Amino acid sequence: MKKIIVLCALFAAAHYTDAALATLDSLNTGANNYYRPTTVGNHNWSDAGMTFHLDVVDDGWGGTTWGGLTYSDMNNTTGAGYTNQ
């Protein structure tokens, strides 16, 4: 049984050797900054041939909220809570 599992794992690894790697290096936002659009709508972004979903929606209370994936150049090792990206 163990041989079958190892064989399946090796087959799966060989199958995905052409997988892309999103480094986000081309998406530099500047030191200690991040990508956060403020206009309502779809703000999908791409890197290494992959597309990532980011949506900004009206929260109904005069503001906006977002869901999906974004990227950041923040480097905060001392802050606590959600402000420490």
Image (spheres, helix red, strand yellow):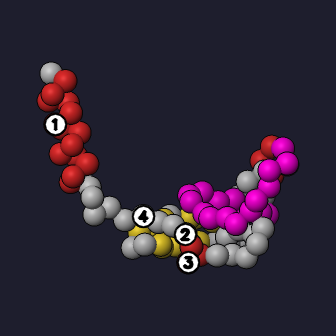
Image marks 2 and 3: residues in contact by CB distance under 8 Å: yes
Q: Residue at x 80, y 55 (%)?
A: 76
Identify the mark at residue 24; answer none if there is no mark.
Answer: 2
Observer-nearest of 52 and 76: 76
What residue is disc 3 on? 26
Coordinates of residue 75 in the picture (x, y in percent): 76, 59
**55 over 13 or under it: above or below:** below
In the rendered structure, does residue 78 fall within the stretch colored magenta?
yes
Identify the mark at residue 7; answer none if there is no mark.
Answer: 1
Q: Amino acid at mark 4?
A: Leu
Mark 4 lies on a secondary structure that is loop
What's drawn in magenta, residue-wise? 62-80
The quarter of the picture where residue 48 lies is bottom left
Label 1, label 4: how far apart the Cα atoms are: 25 Å
The quarter of the picture where residue 3 lies is top left
Observer-nearest of 11 and 35: 11
Label 2, label 3: how far apart the Cα atoms are: 5 Å
